[in-house]
Image: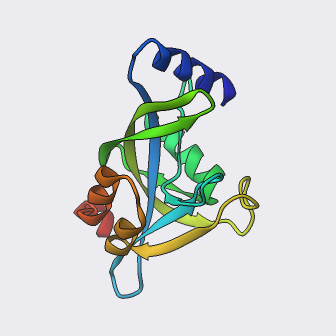
Amino acid sequence: MATAKKKAVRRAKKGERIRQVAAIPFRLSEDGGLEVLLVTSRTTKRFIVPKGWPVKGKSGRKAAMVEAQEEAGVLGKALKQPAGTYSYWKRMATGFVRVDVVVYLLEVTEEMADWQEAANRQRAWLPSADAALLIDEPELSTLLRDLTIPAAVQA
């Protein structure tokens, strides 16, 4: 996605807001509790959700599914409506840029033993309230803490 990143940097330099898409992979535990999957970032090793740049010709939901597969090694069904949004400061070679992220819930159906970024990331399944405590971005932390799964998914 190098070209998407370059375009985003150019837009940011002009003062435009740039955006990304993210997935919150989730599952229901055996006791019916909600668990979410976090991954570590490649550089700082902080816990984050899988996220990346929009992909030309793909919806935000589909792009978020690709990011979850590449960064967390999970496959599943993304819900059509975004779960929410958050903003953060992204570290780039030229400095920091403000990024708005649209977040989609991804109901995990398969967890791969080996995936594209397995060598660079760790992943952890956690109750959403615990995951919220590990996230540095306040808006994303709140989103995770208050996360509810639509009743249609739980049925």
Q: Quadrant of the N terminus?
A: top right
Toward which corner of the image does residue 61 lie, by quadrant? Answer: top left
The spot of residue 29 in percent (x, y) is 41, 81
Is residue 69 in view? yes
| 71 up-or-down from 55: above or below | below
Render colour scheme: rainbow
Horizontal side, residue 115 vs residue 105: left or right: right
Is residue 54 in view? no
Q: Residue at x 42, y 33 (%)?
A: 99
Horizontal side, residue 61 vs residue 43: left or right: left
Q: Quadrant of the C terminus?
A: bottom left
Query: 32 or 98, which lies in front?
Result: 98
Q: Residue at x 37, y 39 (%)?
A: 102
What is the number of callouts on the image? 0
Query: 6 or 108, which lies in front?
Result: 6
Q: Residue at x 53, y 60 (%)?
A: 46
The spot of residue 134 in percent (x, y) is 42, 67
The spot of residue 142 in percent (x, y) is 26, 58
The spot of residue 148 in percent (x, y) is 25, 63
Query: 73 or 88, which lies in front?
Result: 88
**Residue furthest out toward the top:** 14
**Residue furthest out toward the bottom:** 31
Horizontal side, residue 117 vs residue 98: left or right: right
Toward which corner of the image does residue 60 lie, by quadrant? Answer: top left
Horizontal side, residue 49 vs residue 94: left or right: left
